[in-house]
Every structure is written in C-alpha cells, then in structure tokens.
Amino acid sequence: MKGSKCCIATIESHASVRRYTGEAIPEDDLEAVLRAAQRAPTGWNMQPVTVVAVTDRGLLAQLADIVGGQEHVAQAAAFLVFTVDYAKIVAAAEREGVRAKPGLANLYEALIDAGIMAGWAMLAAESLGYGGVLVALYENPCPIVELLGLPRYAVPAVGLALGKPAEKPRPRPRQRLEALAPRNHYGGVDDKAEAVIEAYNGKARKLFAYIFGPEGYYDTASERLRFCLEKQGFL
Ligand SMILES: Cc1cc2nc3c(=O)[nH]c(=O)nc-3n(C[C@H](O)[C@H](O)[C@H](O)COP(=O)(O)O)c2cc1C
C-alpha cells in the first residue's frame, strides 16, 4: 500500500529537507497529505485551523521573502500554511445564534491543533517519498495575513515546505531520552541542561546568543507577533 512505511520507520528516518528537485507534487499525493492533516486530533473536534496550500510560484517567492529569505520556501513544490482560524468558527457560531469572541486560550488550543496537523502532514508526505521542512510563521505573521487574504480571527502559525528531495540529510541529534522524558518525576535541571548542550554539537553558545542575545530573534518576533495578534482580534 502506498505510504504503508508510516509510521515508526518514517519517524526514525525523519530529517528536514531544504533542497528539492523542482518536480510538482501530483494532486493525488497533495490530497493524501491534506487528508492526513484532516484526520489529526483537535480539541472539542472544533478544527479551528485552515491549511492554505500554496503552489503558485509567485506567492511562494513572496512567502520566502516574508520569512526572511528562506530559499527552500521559494523552491518548494508546495507550501502548506497551517493557519489558526476562528473566522469560520465564529461565523458558524453566529449562524447558530451564539456570539463568539476567541481569546488567548482559544489561540493556544488552536496552535496545538495546528502543530499536530502539520506534524501529521509532514509524516504523511515523508511516507510518500517527499521531503520537507516546517517554517516558523509566527515571526512575521501580518504580511502573510495580507498576502493570503486571511480574515480577522485567523493567523498563520507554521508552514510546511514540501517537494521531491534533492538531498538526503542524516537524522539530526536530539536530547537524550532520559533528559527529554523522565519517568514520574522531573528530577532536576542539570542533566537536562547538559543534554541540551550536547544535542547542539558545540554550536549551543552561538545559537543561544542568536536567539536570546540583545535584540535577538525573539525580541523582534515577539513585538511583531503581539501587533498581529491584536490586529487579528486575539488580544
Ligand atoms: C515550529 C518549528 C519552526 C521551524 N522553523 C524553521 C524555519 O523557519 N526554517 C527552517 O529552516 N527550519 C525550521 N524548522 C525546522 C527545524 O529547524 C528542524 O526541525 C530542527 O532543526 C531539527 O532538524 P530535523 O527536523 O532535521 O530533525 C522549524 C521546526 C519547527 C518544529
């Protein structure tokens, strides 16, 4: 059966792929990936997510610019934009005579849903022989809102660039399992900190400085994100 390699074997060989051959993804395969997203669990079975499947080359190039010039987005055969979307839920509630105003907890819940969906879609795509990489969209969401015409109460969470792989990276290191997943008790932070440093193969200091340093990645990201969440009605 197509895709039957899923799941443990697919998970064990997972490595993000950032170079693609340029081949298109046939509609059947794209639909199979979207159906995997559709089957993902979701709080209350509410499904407050919309997946905008972008294949238009002009839009892909613009999305690549918005996310900081990530060339794999421009080169992907498809870029799936997992969008927290309460616009359709609010409209449905109103039709049923209920006034709905999504807030922080709704946003939080939907982000979990969107993340699970993106993971399932990625796994399905990998099981079909595609490669891909998740791309943070929370760093600069409002230009994407505009580009894709997203309504109020919708905000992009994470994207999935997909294509036929033109590289085969080896699975990348992770924290040791006992540090990641202690049994029954947390057991202290020291071994976990060591496990974090180890997992970055000597590059931990540089990465932390980039992310947490003065005017680091998340300072600007947090500002832009807060602005966009207010604009879209969540805060
Ligand atoms: C929420 C999230 C956001 C990510 N954002 C980006 C991104 O913007 N650009 C990128 O190249 N990779 C991104 N990644 C991919 C990670 O860098 C990658 O999963 C990690 O380095 C581990 O590598 P692996 O997936 O090959 O195991 C993201 C992954 C996640 C889960």
Image (tube, grey):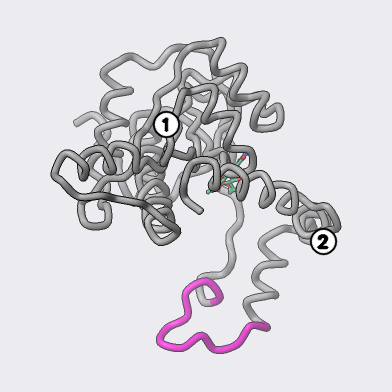
Q: Which mark is on residue 151?
A: 1
Quarter placement of the N terminus: top left
Left or right relative to 103: residue 1: left
Residue 53 on image: x %, y % = 40, 24
Closer to the camera: disc 2 or disc 1? 1
Sequence-wise first label, 2 or 1:
1
The range drawn in magenta is: 179-190
Q: Residues within 10 Å of mark 1 (few under 14, many from 20)?
A: some
Left or right relative to 183: residue 167: right
Along the viewing direction, whichever of 31 and 89 lies nearer the viewer: 89
Residue 186 is covered by the magenta coloring: yes
Q: Which residue is mark 2?
A: 205
Which quadrant of the figure shows ligand 1? top right
Q: Residue at x 63, y 43 (%)?
A: 139
Residue 73 on image: x %, y % = 58, 25
Q: Residues within 10 Å of mark 2 (few under 14, many from 20)?
A: few
Confirm if mark 2 falls within 8 A of ligand 1. Answer: no
Along the viewing direction, whichever of 51 and 202 lies nearer the viewer: 51
Residue 116 is covered by the magenta coloring: no
Q: Secondary structure at mark 2?
A: helix
